Amino acid sequence: MSVQTETFESYEPGTGAVLATFPTLSAEDVTAAVDRARIAARWWADLSWDVRRHRLMAWKSIFANRAEELAELVRRENGKPVDDAMLEIVLTIEHLDWAARHARRVLSERRMWPGLLTANQAATLSYEPLGVVGVIGPWNYPVFTPMGSLAYGLAAGNAMLFKPSEFTPAVGAWLVDTFAEVVPEQPVLQLVTGLGATGAALCRSGVDKISFTGSTGTGMKVMATCAETLTPVLMECGGKDAVLVDADADIAKAADAAAFGAFSNAGQTCVGVERVYVHERIYEPFLAALADRARALRPGSAADSSYGPMTMPAQLDVIKRHIHDALDRGGRAVVGGRDSADDRVVGPVVMTDVPEDSAAILEETFGPTVIVNRVRDLDEAVDRTNATSYGLAAAVFGGDRARLAQASRRLRVGMVSQNSWVMYAGVPSLPWGGVGQSGFGRIHGADGLREFARSKAVVRERFALPISLTTFERKPSTGKLIKALMGVVHGRTKV
Ligand code: NDP
């Protein structure tokens, strides 16, 4: 029985019109949902791999067959153009497919080699579902981002509670409602709507893990709340990603990728391009190419707009502060400038010669702005990229594969794309996640499946060994024999 009395509304950023009204769930509501999820979790975990796979594939088919309906909902609630919404839906379908198909291979029980000392044991490793997992999501990719946890967590056999951002609850409801169409028997996936306090209640509700995607600041609060109950957390937080452009890069290709990475979705992308470090030999032509592309963009809410209005009005203050700080400290605006962020629709901003200690270089901007600074060489580009506290992803452009590989190894980030932007997101077998203030833990791929499972080690004695170390009956000669054996097997390596 629900005890919530309050509601909140979700709005269309393009028009300001109310899209839908949702309940603000209280801590008691959340606890009741977790209780229901406990029963559902047992039911879901007891199904066979094949049955779960089939249900998830049926869910995937709904995404594929009703993609236009979902894309239109994302457009209305988030504000992004329909084609961008379609892009995140297509990526989601690929991930849902991969998670459903590979869960059994990655997580099912397997025999392990027991080793020399314990050769008489049959060793088994299994990955069991955690039970009930809470997913707290952002609004910027309201389908792709939470589904990185939901698809993999459900495939691993968990029941899930999804708390979408207060800016995109209708998209969250679509995900949960369509799952119920393919799994009507139990509330294996439930919607938990509300504001930050509802998210905090989910952290305290006794769930077996919280998978959080959002800003680093909120992530710290979530961790602190989860620490009260020792609830494990997966943190997918903010970024300050860079594009690195070497002297022999294809300038048009790099400028194209930097423009899309910086301005698509109005720059509201965790792996959005906020900095570009360009080799001094091609700095001028690259800057001109990027500026041309930025000037050609037409932001707004029209059907053919390049990108939409800012989803969250409060972000305008951050964007303005970063632009003003960068220009006050000697940076130069090449496209747009101080007036670009005065409206909900922010025009594209390209700045250069911005000091490396300015807010626009060190903090996440999350708007359609990009800084292009020149560097001596690719090594300096890597050093500068690594000099922020974030470490989500980076893109490197150049003609020399060995140099690209070396730069990729040195970059302190979780994901790198060479001669493209963001393509790692489209490879479901690859893990997604950051380092430093960008978070820890991984969604996607085999690592992403294991994030939603706990390993269990089991040994079974197959026969008794003539000698045993784990008995008070052991003889002094036993220890000597084992020590001599270890010397022969492990003690022969010399430097
Ligand atoms: P926020 O950090 O503002 O919110 C994220 C979620 O946390 C929302 O559902 C929010 O609810 C909830 N929340 C707020 N306060 C609390 C609390 N005290 N306890 C528990 N939950 C709480 O992020 P945004 O929604 O603004 O998303 C943008 C951020 O997400 C950017 O920093 C972006 O870089 C990051 N991001 C990271 C990704 C990654 O994979 N690393 C992917 C996508 C985005 P409510 O909205 O109701 O306040």
Image (cartoon, rainbow, N blue to C red):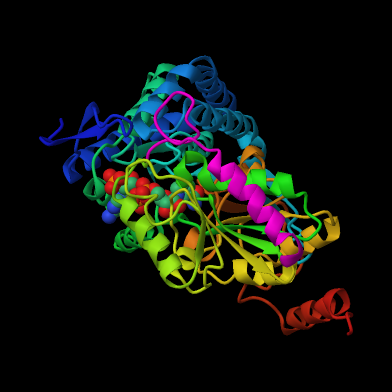
Residue 207 point in image, percent of width and height: 34, 47
**What is the residue that sits farthest to the top in this orientation?**
65
Query: Residue at the spot x=26%, y=52% of the render?
Result: 200
Residue 338 point in image, percent of width and height: 39, 57
Would you place residue 200 above or below residue 389 in this image?
above
Q: How many marks?
A: 0
What residue span does the magenta drawing correspond to? 280-309
- The answer to which image quadrant residue 353 occupies is bottom right
477 or 244, which is in the foreground? 244
Residue 417 point in image, percent of width and height: 69, 50
- Left or right position of 140 against 163: right
Would you place residue 267 above or below residue 435 in this image?
above
Query: Residue at the spot x=41%, y=29% of the render?
Result: 43
Residue 211 seen in the current view: no
Quadrant location of the C terminus in the rendered image: bottom right
- The answer to which image quadrant residue 292 occupies is top right
Residue 269 seen in the current view: yes
Would you place residue 407 above or below residue 451 in this image?
below
Quadrant location of the N terminus in the rendered image: top left
- Left or right position of 17 against 144: left
- Left or right position of 205 against 40: left
Q: Is residue 294 located in the magenta-colored stretch of the structure?
A: yes
345 or 448, which is in the foreground? 345
Query: Residue at the spot x=40%, y=62% of the render?
Result: 322
Residue 161 point in image, percent of width and height: 35, 38
- Left or right position of 232 against 343: right
417 or 376, which is in the foreground? 376
Q: Is residue 409 located in the magenta-colored stretch of the structure?
A: no
4 or 269, which is in the foreground? 269
